[in-house]
Image: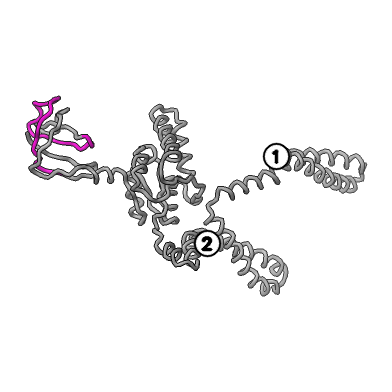
Amino acid sequence: MQLSVDFFARILGALVAGVLFAAIGQTVAELFSASVAGYAVVFGLVGILAGLILTPYITTRPIRSLRNRLVRMPPERLGAIILGIFMGLIAAALISFPLSSLPDPFGSVGPLVAVVIFCYFSIVVLTLRQNDLRIFFASLRPSPENVAAAQAEPEEAYILLDTSVIIDGRITDISRTGFIRSVLVVPNFVLNELQHIADSADTLRRNRGRRGLEVLRILQQEAPIPIQITDMDVSEVREVDSKLVALARELRCPIMTNDYNLNRVAELQGVGVLNINDLANAVKAAFLPGEELDVRIIQEGKEYGQGVGYLEDGTMVVVEDGRNHINKTLNVTVTKVLQTTAGRMIFARP
């Protein structure tokens, strides 16, 4: 179907361009007092060739690209754009009459410029507030249940995923537990960054990128919560982290990440952050001073005589006088529990 449309477009474009260029050739021939037929034939052949080559690039392909973007576009954004066009046309119609009374060329150009300006600003404003529009129109429904649901709809209906949390992979296990109820959203610019990492010449980066793509596949096919790939973008921002923060502010939703710097930047800009490392630290078993536990000493500590071991959940245990018991399992008593940015540390003695 695509080939047939392009073929007919090329034929039609070649005919139109041939006739047009032939007329131009006649005009040129009259200016130079040359053979009209010769110029018309040469220009007509050039027009036919140009029409055959260029027609799809100015007709079918832009239309096809626009159609694909409209298909992938979220319904909220599409509705906001359509409503913005109508509002811009109404506002331009109100101001076009006084503008048309101005002397030429302002009276002729003014109404057209007003249409472009008002439509542009209407689309921009309504697109930025598309979620508010969705909630507003949902609240106009006559059903009391729908009104209550629209009013009670949380701002965190979506969760944006960044590259680090996808590569980390623990999001698949968390999604299976049912604790996450929101829709997971992966912007295309995050997916492009993940693909770029997967195509890296460095073996470690390439393996991390491929792991991230595999995690996305698992989330799409096996996770009980929905995941969406969206083409929503923030064109005025270049960096991926900045795009995520700006998009999260626009959607009024949190970002799930393991990136410390992104975590801090998002918090400074008032964007909610769901950090899997914080979640992992929060669900680790709590130990109070005086409790006993068994731990295997695997290495020396920083201070003299200390030994270091780890619990099954990764919690570090620093044991006094444990240096002489490396590669042995000791029954120790907890003396102090310290919560750090890197996680929880337990100090104990045999």
In percent of width and height, residue 302 lies at 14, 33
Badge nearest the viewer, 1 or 2: 1
Q: Which corner quadrant holds the N terminus?
A: top right
Q: Specify few, some or many for label 2: CA neighbours under 10 Å numbering under 14, 14-19, or 20 or more.
A: many
The amino acid type, in three-letter code, at marker 2 is Leu
| Residue stretch in magenta | 312-337
On screen, residue 246 versus residue 272, left or right, reads right
In percent of width and height, residue 340 lies at 21, 44
Whether the magenta-drawn stretch holds residue 223 is answered as no
The amino acid type, in three-letter code, at marker 1 is Met
Q: Which corner quadrant holds the C terminus?
A: top left
Q: Which mark is residue 17?
A: none
* Disc 1 secondary structure class: loop
Of the two numbered discs 1 and 2 on the same chain, state the one appearing first in sequence.
Answer: 1
Question: In percent of the image, x 61 and y 64: which residue is there?
Answer: 86
Give the residue at mark 1. 1
Q: Which mark is residue 126?
A: 2
Residue 287: quarter of image: top left
In percent of width and height, residue 28 lies at 86, 46
On screen, residue 178 versus residue 239, left or right, reads left
The residue furthest top is: 327
Residue 58: quarter of image: top right
